[in-house]
Image (cartoon, helix red, strand yellow):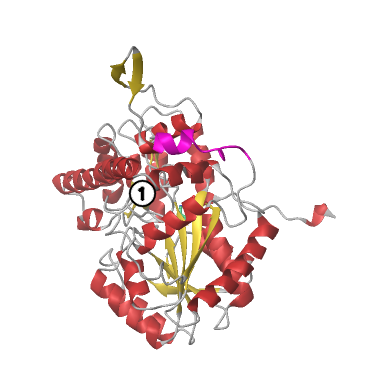
Amino acid sequence: SAEAVPQAPEDPLFGLVRAFKADQHPTKVDVSVGAYRDNTAKPWVLPVVKKVRTLLSGIGFPLAPLLHVCGHTVYAISVADEILRNDPNLDHEYAPIAGIASFTSKAAELILGSGSPAIPEKRVTSVQTISGTGAVHLGALFLSRFFTGTKKVYVSNPTWVNHNQIFSNVGIPVAQYPYFSKQTKGLDFDGMKAALAEAPERSIILLHACAHNPTGVDPTLDQWKEIATLIRQKNHFPFFDTAYQGFATGDLKKDNAAVRYFVEQGFELVIAQSFAKNFGLYGERAGCFHFVTSPAPDASETVTRVASQLAILQRSEISNPPLYGARIVSTVLNDPQLFAEWEENLRTMSGRIIEMRKVLRAKLEELGTPGTWNHITDQIGMFSFTGLTEPQVLKIREEAHVYMTKNGRISMAGLNTNNIDYFAKAVDKVVRE
Ligand code: PMP
């Protein structure tokens, strides 16, 4: 009976969110959750998303009158506006099992690069998923059924916590490779390479495409090249997780450099892609899973067979992916003008975070806080691994009402010009105690 079901522990991150909400302290600071906040600590709906939302709701823009012709007003209509107004399919019917094609094809172009030969060579198949989590899950499920190598996935230590449970849930054991050096607060490259070399032949290697969560530490392109060589030597299978393209540096091409390099090298690989952060569409669950095969005469047949199996897995799990978020993303990715506006929005988000990194480091150095703080500006993306210990994390929560995860990770987006002084002083105090 259900009496035998044991109580599971609360998700630590969402438990923290609850505690923060209940805290009545006027200067409380939330640096726990990986969601962008503007300089007033509020969620930010990207202006380009707002614009597309208006279009999708059927209201359209308050169009600017362009000129008057014979007593009639002629309006300027953007390309996207035209697409949406004339789209007879803008109803609430089911999406195809693999998702909206205009979304998945552009999503593939975005991560692989629009000039990637893998696309015209039909070496890619893409399935729309329930955001990045669903994409990691679909990839894991697919590999649990069809991967012929060592069914074991190596994830970085540390990694996004959900990786462990997603792979375990489909019966793929999880092992770790060293990643973060406590000494340098940078990459433990030697440790990582040694572990990849020691892993059983043809293991699955999970890699964060950019802006590693939780450390903010990424390999350089030269280091990626060495990693690729090692993976090739051991015939390992790369599984890329990309949740921060464009969000990390503001440059979409910089943030997919690792994936592009691996595809250029002809690897067969998979990619789990999220649009939660770079579109600010967290709750809409827009994501995509891509399978890319190596160049070969029968590559397109391989892809067709893989696609057929992915469709069966998708059907049994969610039948059809959700429309709304994918429609927003698709509209932007398919319209050059909206795309340029999106890039501008990405620069706003990444720019503010980069600025907060600079200010935080400067403040800690100014205060003479014991330790070195260059890692704050060396690390990139949403998160920073501060190096604070668990007792310090608990203390700063208790004494200063600053909420971060136990591993000392902070979401840079939680900092702003109003609270960064307070935050830096709180860190300074707890480090000295
Ligand atoms: N992978 C990584 C590394 C992440 O940080 C995240 C978001 N926290 C995800 C995947 C997926 O998030 P979502 O399901 O919200 O797209």
Residue 136: x, y in percent? 52, 62
Q: Which residues are magenta?
A: 80-92
- Nearest the viewer among 115 and 316 is 115
Screen quadrant of the N terminus: bottom right
Residue 79 appears in view: yes
Residue 48: x, y in percent? 36, 36
The residue pinned by badge 1 equals: 410
Number of disc labels: 1
Which residue is painted at 19% across and 43% down in the image? 359
Residue 292: x, y in percent? 46, 71
Look at the numbered disc 1 and give the secondary structure of its residue.
strand
- Nearest the viewer among 213 and 54 is 54
Which residue is painted at 61% across and 77% down in the image? 146
Residue 278 appears in view: no
Looking at numbered disc 1 in the image, what kind of residue is underneath it? Answer: Ile
Q: Is residue 201 above or below residue 67?
A: below
Which residue is painted at 55% across and 55% down in the image? 129
Residue 319 on the magenta segment:
no
Q: Residue furthest front?
A: 70
